[in-house]
Amino acid sequence: MKRFLFTVLTALALPSLAGAAALEQLPGETVLASIPAPIPAIPARQSARPLVCVDPGHPNTFNDGFAPVNGTNETRINWQVALRLESVLKAKGFDVLLTRHAEREFVENKDRARICNNGAVLAVHLHCESTPGTGFALYYPDRQGVYDYKNDPENGFKGPSELVRTDSRSLATVLANSMGGTLEGALKNRGVYGDSRTAVGSSQGALTFSIFSNIPTVTIEMVVLTNKKDAAFIKAEAGQQQMAQAIAAGIVSYTAR
Ligand SMILES: [Zn+2]
């Protein structure tokens, strides 16, 4: 039994494909079937710098984010701002974990949370809205949610914890203040809301990557991409840089408390 456990643990520590192959060769299908699918392997950290998880939203099962909007698309904008935010945060003394490594890399929302849980002190999920109105808004998990995806073996998973919810609310408030200052005159501050105000959050109780999060987590709807003025701002390099600086300033404030 000891030897079996050791083999399983060794296999889990391997990069995902090698791990999956090794697991399939072991006896005991019922035990193996209960092991969740491995998330991408992340090297052990050597750095003392705080690690921030930056999640450029989409593509995932429910929305690839590729629909053309005002000469761009949401997946592209999220990716471009994420790269700028990574660079600004590194210059400010942070290490950065991105949940995807290419503009169109597909990652499920629950896996985005699990990647961020792997050593990061907080997570920001970058998105753009397609609703009436203009400006940026922030969302945090205001109640426990229940993952509702019948085709997923983790259907029914509950989270996040009360501590994560409290800390996420603080992070959202600090970020909104910082962004409001840095982006004043450029983008309207639409405020801070609970996940339960979103379409997915109203049915699940929280957004999927909030449900699976073990760390403070905030969704930033950076602009209303269907608004022409907002789209022009966030398509420009200067606007993207300003957005990255606004978010980074909030992260600096939050982690310095
Ligand atoms: Zn989105």
Image (tube, rainbow, N blue to C red):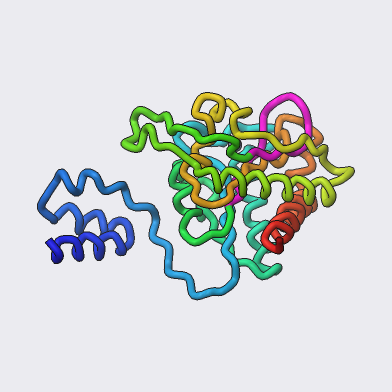
The answer to whether residue 98 is visible is yes
Vertical position of residue 214 compared to residue 144: above or below: below
Which quarter shows the C terminus?
bottom right
The answer to whether residue 84 is visible is no
- The one of 133 and 83 positioned closer to us in this rendering: 133
Asked if the magenta segment contains residue 120, the reply would be no
Vertical position of residue 22 compared to residue 220: above or below: below
Position of residue 140 measured from the top left corner of the image (x, y, whole percent): 62, 40
Left-right relation of 29 to 248: left
Position of residue 70 measured from the top left corner of the image (x, y, whole percent): 71, 33
Picture mark count: 0
Asked if the magenta segment contains residue 127, the reply would be yes
Which residues, given as a range, are shown in magenta? 123-139
Vertical position of residue 166 compared to residue 197: above or below: below
Quarter of image, ligand 1: top right
Left-right relation of 187 to 9: right
Q: What residue sits 49% from the left and 37% below the top? A: 208
Q: What residue sits 78% from the left and 40% below the top? A: 232
- The one of 224 and 73 positioned closer to us in this rendering: 224
Position of residue 245 measured from the top left corner of the image (x, y, whole percent): 75, 56
